[in-house]
């Protein structure tokens, strides 16, 4: 019996040591570490203004951007931190950027006279668990370079004389209001401006306020000009371009003024006053400005766009051209169209038209620069004289 008991005891020990008998296994083993991995959606090249699908951005050219996306695969939840960083230091075009999340950043695409590139780094930290010892943080990164095939920035000048310190913006939705997403800039001393974002050809450009450089007169905040952009050439925004907007796309200001060599939409008339055509263009701009300012002040019409629209409407109705801009007929018809408050009867409207016609026809562009003095009077004192007449209903 002793031998049998010893055999049973020994057999039981052997089975227990081998994990026999269907027991729960011999302890837990540490699974192999799987470090986080990433997939990336990053464009290598973007053509400025083309809204490439590779950038992952949507919308029209002013929404073009560099979009960089990193998608993590982290089955063991080891990630501690992750973020995009701007690596480039040689150009301001690569920042500031906006961060949608740790995984996505956007950077605007800027227009430029030269191509440029932006460097970015995606950096992350994760927990590393060694086979022996305490877990600790490790970091890693992946670098990217995005090349921008830039196009020249849209630029031009605001001319009636030059208008400086005016706010000028791209009216993307054509509501004549500057919305938050619309590119804008300020005009310089010679009316010059430049946008730093890509802009489509024939985008609507709106100017507000400013100072007339030639006379020093501060224009009302609601003073407005409109025009259209050109992506590859400088363009002019002026009183003529403002009326042309309301005349429709088939209207040619050059034909209307009988101008053949001078391009009203592109050429600066002030720099070419030795040209008869340039002088004619500048004089027409000056006359339109005086008409608009006088009507605005005297008939309490604060919306300059309605004045330009009315002039365009009456030019069409009466089959008149820009050569007739200072005619008594056009001025009279415009006044009656604008004067919805009936501030002037027919006789007074005709009298004001005659006074404006006489004053405008006295302005001559020549080397004496006397026209600048009359331009100043036309913007400043002449509207006051007409306003005083309306107020007192007596002849000047």
Image (cartoon, rainbow, N blue to C red):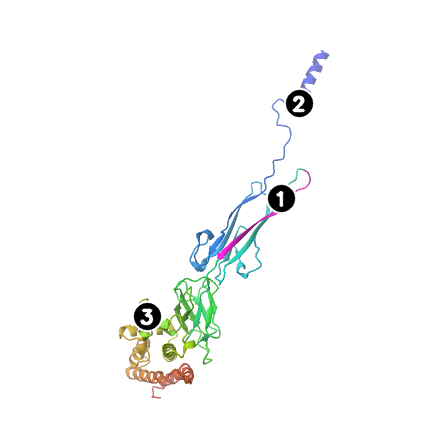
Whole-number angstrom distance, CA of label 1 to CA of label 3: 70 Å
Q: Describe the element under mark 1 as helix, strand or loop.
A: strand
- Mark 1 vs mark 3: in front: 3
**Residue furthest to the right:** 2
In the rendered structure, find residue 148 and report the number of the disc placed on it. none
In the rendered structure, find residue 127 and report the number of the disc placed on it. 1
**Residue furthest to the top:** 1
Q: For this rendering, which residue is in front, 183 or 12?
A: 183
Residue at 41% x, 77% y: name it: 272
Q: Is residue 303 visible?
A: no
Which of the two discs, 2 and 1, labels the residue nearer the N terminus?
Answer: 2
Total tally of numbered discs in the picture = 3
Residue at 28% x, 82% y: name it: 346
Which of the two discs, 2 and 3, labels the residue nearer the N terminus?
Answer: 2
Q: Main secondary structure of the magenta part?
A: strand
Q: Is residue 80 visible?
A: yes
Q: Can you say which quadrant of the picture contains the C terminus? A: bottom left
Mark 3 sits on what residue?
252
Whole-number angstrom distance, CA of label 2 to CA of label 3: 102 Å
Q: For this rendering, which residue is in front, 65 or 81?
A: 65
Q: Which residues are magenta?
A: 132-148
In the rendered structure, find residue 16 and report the number of the disc placed on it. 2
């Amino acid at each position: 019996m002793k031998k049998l008991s010893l055999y049973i005891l020994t057999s039981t020990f052997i089975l227990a040591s081998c994990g026999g008998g269907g027991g729960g296994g011999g302890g837990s083993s540490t699974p192999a570490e799987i470090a986080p991995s990433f997939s990336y959606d990053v464009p290598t090249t973007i053509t400025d203004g083309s809204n490439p699908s590779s950038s992952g951005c949507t919308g029209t050219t002013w929404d073009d951007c560099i979009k960089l996306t990193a998608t993590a695969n982290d089955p063991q939840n080891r990630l501690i931190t992750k973020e995009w960083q701007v690596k480039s230091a040689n150009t301001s075009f690569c920042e500031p950027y906006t961060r949608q999340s740790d995984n996505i950043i956007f950077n605007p695409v800027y227009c430029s006279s030269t191509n440029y590139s932006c460097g970015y780094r995606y950096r992350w930290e994760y927990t590393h668990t060694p086979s022996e010892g305490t877990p600790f943080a490790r970091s890693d990164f992946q670098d990217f370079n995005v090349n921008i095939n830039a196009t020249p920035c849209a630029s031009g000048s605001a001319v009636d004389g030059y208008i400086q310190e005016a706010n000028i913006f791209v009216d993307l939705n054509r509501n004549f209001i500057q919305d938050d997403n619309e590119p804008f800039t300020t005009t310089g001393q010679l009316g010059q401006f430049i946008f730093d974002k890509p802009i489509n050809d024939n985008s609507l450009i709106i100017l507000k306020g400013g100072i007339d450089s030639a006379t020093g007169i501060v224009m009302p905040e609601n003073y407005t000009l409109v025009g259209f952009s050109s992506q590859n050439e400088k363009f002019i925004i002026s009183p003529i371009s403002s009326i042309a907007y309301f005349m429709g796309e088939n209207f040619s200001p050059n034909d209307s003024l009988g101008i053949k060599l001078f391009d009203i939409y592109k050429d600066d008339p002030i720099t070419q006053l030795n040209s008869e055509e340039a002088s004619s263009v500048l004089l027409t701009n000056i006359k339109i400005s005086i008409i608009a300012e006088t009507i605005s002040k005297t008939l309490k019409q604060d919306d300059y766009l309605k004045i330009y629209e009315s002039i365009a409407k009456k030019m069409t109705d009466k089959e008149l051209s820009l050569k007739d801009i200072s005619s008594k007929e056009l001025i009279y018809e415009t006044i009656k169209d604008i004067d919805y408050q009936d501030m002037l009867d027919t006789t007074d409207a005709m009298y004001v038209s005659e006074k404006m016609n006489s004053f405008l026809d006295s302005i001559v562009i020549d080397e004496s620069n006397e026209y600048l003095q009359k331009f100043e009077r036309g913007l400043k004192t002449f509207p006051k004289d007409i306003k005083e007449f309306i107020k007192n209903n007596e002849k000047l």
